[in-house]
């Protein structure tokens, strides 16, 4: 008897639809040997949803996600929507999805593929062997804290306000996710904050420090965010798991992504306490290359692998997809973002075909 999963497929804008098309075929094929069937229901999100319905995250799409076993997301955004009022911008769809589904834990692994060491802008000896995981808090902090807005004071001067706020409970639940993740890896956790200046970070640090008693097997360290940004490019191999708040995690995860040479290679998972997770590439919608068959579909494929592993508890399906990625890199197939002399240049669909052939 086949095991069936209902997958909400939100390809989004820009390169989203092309990398998603490639990925859905590979996911289906990777499921077959395990008798696992992924049933896809597509929906609009971001700019394309705004064009069709006037809203970047229509309520029926949030409902579709809630009823699914997992959500596979492409990317949202594009130049044509940059001037919309902020509540209608495509990015709002991501924030709405995160808060609507309670996805407080964002896992962003950055692992360098041995074949791509030369693609990094850092020296090979610095990036070789990098394998770290950023655990970013995703539904709190300055992204959601109140008050927020642009207000006029008595003199009619406008003031822009956002509030960085964390409750003990919010820190504790993301902290536990990070400690548990570290347990399954090299058992090192670095908590990143700005406790030398911010009270919210002092609370963060004290809660994480208290939690450490429950995880004596995990070695806990703390870094200020400015130092962490520096250490990430100075000697990234010192990191195993990094746990941090929403804004610092946004910034550090882009930096970590770049260590690996291309942001076009990195997947992410956003998980809540229960219910479906959202699995999406770390990169954006790349409107400048959309529709030209130039995009690298690997981050989307690896996001589907994360979905199989964490969203559907099908590690064999995930392993199969990850092995196929290693194999095509070994075989020398490269999209433009990771191209190197002597390699075989392929587009998005070409990479998709190579991946399908490489599946065992
Ligand atoms: C990310 C993105 C989003 C964020 C934007 C598009 C809202 O940068 O997922 O990292 O800031 O969280
Ligand atoms: Mg970001």
Image (cartoon, rainbow, N blue to C red):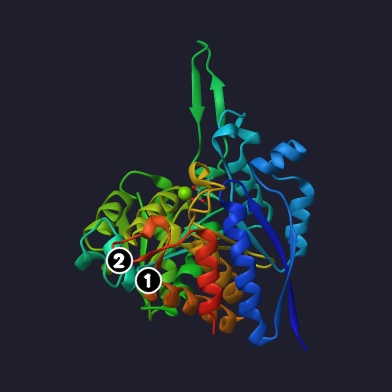
Classify mark 1: residues with Cα within 10 Å, few (<14), some (14-19) or many (20+).
some
Q: Residue at x 52, y 59 (%)?
A: 348
Give the residue drawn at x 26%, y 55%: 121
Q: Is mark 1 within 8 Å of ligand 2?
A: no
Which residue does the numbered mark 1 point to in the structure image? 332
Q: Position of residue 105 (x, y in %)?
A: 54, 61
Q: Which residue is mark 2?
A: 342
Residue positioned 63% across, 77% down in the render: 29
Number of disc labels: 2
Looking at the rendering, in which quadrant would you find the N terminus?
bottom right
Residue 19 rendering spot, x and y as whole percentages: 57, 58
Q: What's the CA distance linking mark 1 and mark 2?
A: 8 Å
Q: Which mark is residue 2?
A: none
The answer to whether residue 107 is visible is no
Question: Of helix, strand and loop, which one carries label 1?
Answer: loop
**Pick the front one: 188 or 233:** 233
Disc 1 and disc 2 in contact, CB within 8 angstroms = yes
């Amino acid at each position: 008897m086949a095991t069936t999963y209902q997958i909400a497929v939100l390809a989004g804008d820009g390169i989203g639809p092309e990398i998603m098309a490639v990925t859905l075929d590979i996911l289906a094929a990777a499921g077959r040997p395990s008798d696992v069937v992924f049933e896809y229901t597509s929906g609009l999100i971001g700019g394309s949803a705004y064009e069709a319905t006037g809203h970047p995250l229509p309520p029926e799409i949030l409902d579709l996600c809630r009823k699914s076993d997992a959500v596979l997301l492409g990317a949202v955004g594009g130049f044509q929507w940059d001037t919309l009022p902020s509540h209608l911008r495509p990015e709002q769809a991501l924030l709405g999805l995160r808060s609507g589904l309670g996805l407080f834990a964002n896992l962003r692994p950055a692992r360098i593929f041995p074949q791509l060491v030369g693609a990094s802008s850092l020296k090979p000896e610095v990036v070789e062997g990098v394998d770290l995981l950023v655990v970013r808090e995703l539904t709190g902090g300055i992204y959601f804290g109140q008050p927020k807005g642009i207000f006029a004071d008595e003199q009619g001067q406008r003031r822009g306000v956002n509030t960085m706020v964390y409750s003990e409970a919010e820190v504790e639940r993301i902290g536990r996710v990070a400690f548990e993740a570290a347990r399954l890896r090299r058992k090192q956790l670095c908590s990143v904050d700005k406790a030398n200046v911010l009270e919210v970070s002092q609370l963060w640090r004290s809660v994480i420090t208290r939690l450490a008693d429950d995880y004596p097997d995990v070695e806990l360290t703390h870094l200020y965010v400015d130092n962490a940004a520096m250490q990430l490019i100075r000697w990234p191999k010192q990191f195993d798991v990094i746990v941090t708040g929403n804004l610092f995690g946004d910034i550090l995860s882009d930096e970590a992504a770049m260590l690996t040479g291309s942001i076009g290679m990195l997947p992410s998972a956003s998980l809540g306490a229960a219910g479906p997770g959202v699995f999406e590439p770390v990169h954006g919608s790349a409107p400048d290359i959309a529709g030209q068959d130039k995009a690298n579909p690997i981050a989307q494929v690896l996001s589907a692998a994360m979905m199989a592993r964490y969203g559907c508890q099908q590690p064999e399906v995930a392993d199969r997809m990850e092995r196929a990625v290693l194999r095509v890199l070994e075989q020398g197939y490269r999209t433009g973002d990771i191209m190197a002399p002597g390699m075989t240049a392929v587009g998005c669909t070409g990479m998709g075909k190579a991946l399908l052939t490489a599946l065992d």
